[in-house]
Image (cartoon, rainbow, N blue to C red):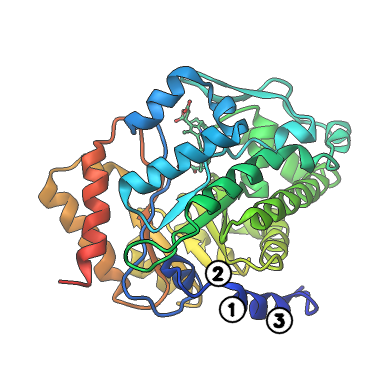
């Protein structure tokens, strides 16, 4: 159900409030741009020596929770790469803490939730009234926004991206207790607990909207919603158990006055359903040719993507050809943001990342 009282206002507000000087925001809204904007998933990660130097002295959570350091890491990556947008350094799982779900990052294992959420009683006990505790992310965004407040040499304003997880992907970490291959416990709750699953979805949406609101108020121009593991779902299950809460999240974030990018991996078959969330931009993974993915979306939204991140390990001629292939597939339609099809992995040669950004920027100039 569309909420008529919110929808028209949100579109009008977004058109008016977008600065008009950021090619990244303009592309999100499918407005014409002077060249294709570019940024990269996980641009501030472990492949970057500057990040590893900071990481030597601080844990991942310390970096996230110290606005000075999170802002510095965000800014350094964006400036080093010369990209058109900076994504705030944070993590998908941060909202777990105010909800009452303890977790930690174990080296080599990723995130671990020590008491996974498996019962209705546990879902009922999740708190939604402490979103204020996440304000450190907004404080980091304020610092990044202040740093990038002046237009750059080419007259363009750098875009600032806030982000959060999508209900399914966050629920999967809560329920499985960490990363998963088959999502058995997640799907077990989804299929069998008619009370716990919808309540969990609703609580996550409420917390995420409050969290996104803090980020927008602090200066985020766009919110990206990561549904990284949604590709584990069949189209039927996505529609039955996840589409509605995700659509509500997208609509309520848009009502804050910003465009929404909705991203998942392994989503070729899900794209038409993902489009129904109403997101302004859909992030495509690299398995589907960009033009085919855009077509599956009916060309009715912007797209972001979708170079295979492992191509960054390839020799220069192969890498350049693949970058061109993505840009050629977009065929100059308004509403393409160049990115990877998933995050940069540790060990990626930094010079190849920088060169990729340069090729994208030079593409239309040639
Ligand atoms: O520039 C950036 O994009 C970095 C900011 C960022 C982090 N996490 C920091 C981080 C972002 C956007 C995220 C999002 C995130 N977190 C996702 C969605 C993105 C995706 O790839 O689909 C997910 C699934 C998580 C949860 C998470 N956090 C996992 C699974 C892991 C382990 C990953 C691994 O390779 O070990 C993390 C840890 C994490 N979050 C790291 C970083 C830079 C690496 C660990 C470290 O620095 O110690």
Badge 3 density bin: few <14, some 14–19, many ≥20, Cα 10 Å = few
Q: What element carries label 3?
A: helix
Q: Considering only order in the chain, which callout, 2 or 3, is on the residue closer to the N terminus?
A: 3
Along the viewing direction, whichever of 251 and 156 lies nearer the viewer: 156
Left or right position of 190 against 223: right
What whole-number distance in Å separates the C-alpha atoms at marks 3 and 1?
A: 11 Å
- Residue tagged by mark 2? 280
| Rendered-image quadrant of the N terminus | bottom right
Identify the residue at the far left of this view.
Answer: 317
Q: Considering only order in the chain, which callout, 2 or 1, is on the residue closer to the N terminus?
A: 1
What whole-number distance in Å separates the C-alpha atoms at marks 3 and 2?
A: 14 Å
Rendered residue at 38%/50% (across/down)? 40
Rendered residue at 45%/72% (across/down)? 21
- Residue tagged by mark 3? 8
| x then y, percent, for residue 24 | 44, 65
Q: Are marks 3 and 2 in contact (CB under 8 Å)?
A: no
Rendered residue at 39%/67% (across/down)? 156
Residue 15: numbered disc: 1
Residue 77: numbered disc: none
- Above or below residue 17? Residue 361 is above
Q: What element carries label 2?
A: loop
| Rendered-image quadrant of the C terminus | bottom left
| x then y, percent, for residue 174 | 69, 33
| x then y, percent, for residue 19 | 53, 72
Q: Is mark 2 within 8 Å of ligand 1?
A: no
């Amino acid at each position: 159900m569309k909420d008529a009282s919110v929808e028209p206002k949100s579109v009008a507000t977004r058109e008016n409030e977008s600065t008009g000087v950021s090619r990244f925001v303009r592309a999100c809204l499918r407005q014409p741009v002077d060249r294709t904007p570019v940024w990269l998933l996980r641009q501030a990660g472990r492949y970057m020596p500057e990040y590893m130097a900071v990481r030597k002295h601080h844990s991942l959570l310390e970096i996230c929770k110290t606005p000075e350091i999170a802002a510095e890491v965000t800014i350094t990556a964006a400036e080093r790469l010369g990209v058109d947008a900076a994504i705030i350094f944070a993590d998908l799982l941060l909202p777990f803490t105010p909800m009452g779900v303890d977790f930690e990052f174990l080296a080599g294992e990723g995130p671990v939730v020590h008491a996974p959420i498996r019962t209705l009683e546990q879902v009922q006990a999740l708190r939604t009234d402490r979103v204020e505790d996440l304000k450190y992310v907004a404080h980091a965004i304020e610092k990044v926004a202040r740093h990038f407040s002046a237009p750059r040499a080419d007259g363009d304003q750098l875009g600032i991206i806030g982000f959060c997880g999508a209900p399914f992907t966050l629920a999967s970490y809560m329920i499985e207790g960490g990363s998963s291959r088959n999502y058995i416990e997640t799907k077990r709750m989804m299929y069998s607990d008619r009370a716990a699953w919808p309540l969990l979805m609703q609580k996550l949406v409420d917390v995420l909207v409050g969290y996104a609101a803090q980020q927008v108020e602090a200066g985020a121009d766009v919110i990206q919603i990561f549904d990284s593991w949604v590709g584990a779902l069949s189209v039927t299950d996505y529609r039955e158990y996840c589409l509605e809460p995700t659509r509500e999240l997208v609509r309520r974030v848009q009502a804050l006055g910003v465009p929404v990018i909705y991203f998942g991996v392994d989503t070729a078959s899900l794209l038409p359903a993902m489009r129904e969330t109403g997101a302004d931009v859909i992030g495509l993974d690299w398995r589907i040719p960009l033009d085919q993915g855009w077509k599956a979306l009916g060309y009715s939204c912007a797209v972001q993507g979708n170079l295979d991140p492992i191509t960054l390990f390839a020799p220069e001629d192969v890498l350049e050809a693949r970058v061109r292939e993505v840009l050629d597939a977009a065929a100059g339609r308004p509403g393409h943001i160049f990115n990877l099809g998933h995050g940069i992995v540790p060990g990626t040669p930094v010079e190849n990342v920088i060169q990729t950004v340069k090729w994208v920027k030079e593409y239309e100039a040639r």
